Image: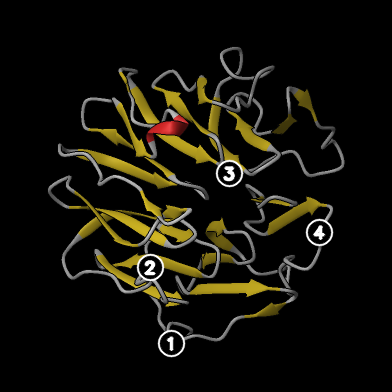
Amino acid sequence: TSTQTCAIEKYSQTVSCFGIRNDTTIPDDSIQFESISSGDYLFCGITLIEKKMLCWKKGYYVISELSNETGFSTKLSTGQNHACALKNQQILCMGRSDYGQATPPSGNFVDISCGNRSTCAIDVNGKIHCFGKHYVSNRFVTSPPNGTFVEVHVGPGTQACAVSSIGEIHCWGLEEFDENQVHSGPFIHVNVHLYGYCGTYTNLTVECFGQSKVFQDLALSTQFLEISIGIFDACGVENATNLLLCETVGRIHDVSFLPNDFE
């Protein structure tokens, strides 16, 4: 989020959070998770044992129509006030759907990503499907590209990107933000933030693009297993050490008070 970062500790599988806002900290920090995701006001995770989709905000758990569901995969994404996850390749969503962002299509899917008011998913044939609305000043963003894709990520603003089956990053959105571009890579992951996006190469180094670049001190010199980018901060799990490294405007945070190993 814009004010808090959370990560799963490697050995305990529990969640640790840090930042200036504590109202999104998980109410019970003893629960083990397989994956987590955060929006601006909402955190969700897939529990390790039962594979439940557990969501929380403002210090309490959110009760939804999915609260008793089990058997979710690790594919989970959280938007501003909604979240979606995959179960048996079906999309299940909870939360606000005033723009249709939590009303998914039928079909079999392999990846999912939630923005503030829209959601995109990749079906088993590699096609991108988006639902909900993504707009600024009543201008709607462009449609997703054609082709075959393996990963998609919708940002908190007006941009979205996807990794193609040949490792290219394709981005779409409002042209004034310079988002409609293709980068050859080869990439294996993409992460979109408010004014740009970062791609992880096959050698686990990271390169960032757009108006506001992040990982300026860490990108091409560090290998990351996983990265996450908020509005003001970027964090990544270093491949060699499992240390959590964070950066704001090119400055590295001291997170030495956190446990060493993260996923």
Secondary structure under tag 1 reads loop
What residue is disc 3 on? 263
The residue located at (55%, 35%) in the rendering is: 195
Which residue is more in the foreground, 20 or 257? 20
Q: Earlier in the sequence, mark 3 or mark 2?
A: 2
Disc 4 + disc 3, Cβ < 8 Å: no
- Which numbered dot is residue 101? 2
What residue is disc 1 on? 65
Secondary structure under tag 4 reads loop
Of badges 2 and 4, the one in the foreground is: 2
The residue located at (32%, 19%) in the rendering is: 186
Of badges 1 and 4, the one in the foreground is: 4
Q: Counting other residues with Cα less than 10 Å from the Cα at mark 3, is it few (<14), some (14-19), or many (20 or more)?
A: some
Q: Counting other residues with Cα less than 10 Å from the Cα at mark 2, is it few (<14), some (14-19), or many (20 or more)?
A: many
Measured along the vertical axis of the image, is residue 131 above or below residue 169? below
Disc 3 + disc 2, Cβ < 8 Å: no
Q: Position of residue 9 (x, y in %)?
A: 67, 50
Q: What distance separates the C-alpha of mark 3 from that of mark 2?
A: 28 Å
What residue is disc 4 on? 21
Q: Identify residue type, mark 3.
A: Glu
